[in-house]
Image: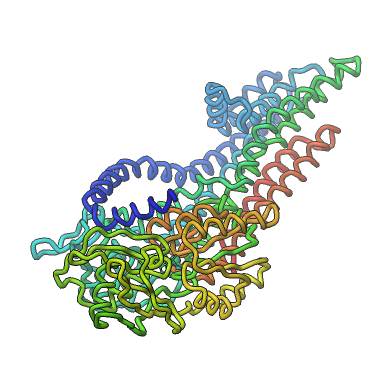
Amino acid sequence: MDYDENMNDCSNVNSFNKENIMAAEEEEKKLRSEEPEPEEEEEEEEEMDPKHKLIQIIVSTILLIVATVITKLNPNLAMWQKLLIFLVPYFCAGFDVLKEAGESIGHGEVFNEDFLMVVATVGALLIGFVPGGKANFTEAVFVMLFFQVGELFEGIAEGSSHRAISQLLDIRPDTANVERDGKVEVVSPDDVKVGEIVVIKPGEKVPMDGVVLEGKSSLNTVALTGESAPRDVAQGDDILSGCVNESGLLRVKVTKAFGESTASKILELVEHSSARKSKSEKFIAKFARVYTPIVVFAAVAVAFLPPLLSGNFTANFATWLLRALTFLIVSCPCALVVSVPLAFFGGIGASSKCGILVKGSGFMESLSEADTVVFDKTGTLTKGVFEVSAIHPEKMDAKELLHLAAHVERYSTHPIAISLRDAFGNENDGCSVEDVTEISGQGVKATVNGKTVYVGNTKLMDSIGAKWTACEEPGTIIHVAVGSEYAGHIHISDVEKDDAKQAITDLKSIGIRKTVMLTGDREKVAKHVAEDLGLDEYRAELLPADKVDNVEKLLAEKPDGKSLVFVGDGINDAPVLARADVGIAMGALGSDAAIEAADVVLMDDKPSKIAKGIRIARHTLLVARQNIVIAIVVKIAILILAVFGYAPMWLAVFGDTGVLLICILNSARTLSTKV
Ligand code: ADP
Ligand code: MG
């Protein structure tokens, strides 16, 4: 019952407490304007890094060659003199690694990759001083250099996937041309208020959501929806921020503040998506935390135990110390730590390219395990654009019945409400509409010109004791009662979305076990739609709470390790969206509550995108798992070779960085997933 009340609260807030909302928006805006700066700095730093790193690597390589030549030309140099010479390229190659290792020890985090590298390289520099040890100066510098090469590639790969995502989401408008006092001013979109009029020239991005007052044009929506066909707009049409105005000049009345507009919402979603970690990423993080200390202790054991047990410590220590150092180098878990999140990042990018916004890699993972897909009907499988096809009044004329219905529905965002208002047309005729209460899944109650009027389904009529008349026509029937007196019904019909049937066929073809439709609509309508689209099951006449119960049951039925996806437009189904393993919301039609409650948002409301999203998710998971296997297998193999003395230090380094490169390149494949 809780959410029922909440939902009602929401709809009331939406319609009546505009001031509060505005105040909240203001506050949010303030917060937002404080936030972005550090983020931007961070990005810049990341982008600068690879160039610096490359220069550092080149200079260190030259210094290493010089040091090698000097020591070769002067074979009589003492060990400490050689050490001093090699320390020059060593510090050049590794000053930042040394600094970071020092800092993290300061923070009490000992076992990270920088620390491993420092121990391994310092060990290699000093091993020549151990009785029986051979100098390994070149190798020590080499290890540091290769580690830096790995970091360089890591930086490049992360930078390029960042850029790829921001490019395909190149929807943040920089300026808005706003009409003020008869003049057009160019301002930041943040400064434009709801209700102001903006002018959008051809070639410009639509700065905020609004409705066209004047002009005709076609909009390029590819950045938002992945759809390349332009959308024609004219007077009266709603337009979304982030689209590009292609041909005509448009005058648009702003309906949403910048922070609340589509473009900002999407950017926010994508920017925060990496914070929601997948199980694989959490596993890797945990793995690294446990694995690194184990390897360090194992390395200590390799260095000390065999020589101690051999009975002649001094003779054998140098050999085993070298093996232990090699062991440490291979053990660096960076290939995993870097490449797995990168794979998810790429997958999220690939799906955004198709207009599918996945809010985090955890949802990517659940989506790949989809087994049951549950749909809402109205607005999800059907267009949610109802046409009034018949009016059957009792005790009043047809016009009066429609008039009452449209007025009661004045503040509702339900597709039914919108169509009743549209059918009536002249909404502002001075009638008073008060005490509006929306009863989720049943209808709306309001006081119109002093009389209490109920508009909704038979459940609502039954609850107030109105004697309703059954209607034989197919389609949705909206009953109206004044007080508890039945006043007649309005027959409306909806059409299926063009790709709804395809969506179900696609889901079947990729192996989804069960498709189910849950609806609050009549049994008759539900049966017709379910059979027509080829859904496995349907349940009709459900209240939002019944939808949750049904989803709970389906959740209990699905096999372990599989997930349940719920797809809805969020009107009356935000609780189910939140309850499912993955909640998918229709972004353009859906309510803001749905977009917030959902884990995945479809920008163009096309149910056929669901199968596409699942395929991208599966590919992403495959790549992430490949990386885990490649990295662990190669590392374990080299670790074993190292212990038995078959892996020289340079092979270990090569193996380590090589695995990192292979994994990074593999991960990059997810960004260009073709479906
Ligand atoms: P669905 O599950 O198909 O998306 P809803 O749960 O949104 O449908 O609504 C279920 C039923 O409740 C509708 O078919 C309609 O009969 C009634 N209803 C809900 N909201 C309204 C409204 N604003 N006006 C009239 N009837 C409504
Ligand atoms: Mg619905």
| 262 lies left or right of 531 | left
Residue 313 in view: yes
> How many numbered discs?
0
Residue 105 sits above or below residue 399 on the image: above
Which residue is the extreme one toward the left?
Answer: 181
- Place residue 89 in its image quadrant: top right
Residue 128 lies left or right of residue 146; in this view the side is right
Q: In which quadrant of the rendered view does residue 649 lie?
A: top right
Looking at the picture, tell me which residue is in the foreground, 246 or 129: 246
Q: Nearer the viewer, residue 670 or 93?
A: 670
Residue 74, placed above or below residue 420: above
Give the image location of residue 194, x and y in percent: 22, 58
User: In the rendered view, would you say 515 is above or below 108?
Assistant: below
* Residue for point 40% across, 76% down: 477
> Which residue is found at the position 76% from the left and 23% from the top?
300
Task: Left or right? Give the position of 248 relative to 499.
Answer: left
Residue 281 location (% of width, % of height)? 61, 44
Residue 248 at least partly seen:
no
What x and y, as percent, mark residue 100?
Answer: 54, 29
Q: Residue 206: horizontal and vertical position, in percent?
A: 30, 65
Q: Residue at x 53, y 66 (%)?
A: 518
In front here: 52 or 4?
4
Vertical order, 44 against 575 (above or below): above
The reply, left or right, for residue 110 in relation to residue 386 is right
Find ligand 2 in the image and state its quadrant.
bottom left
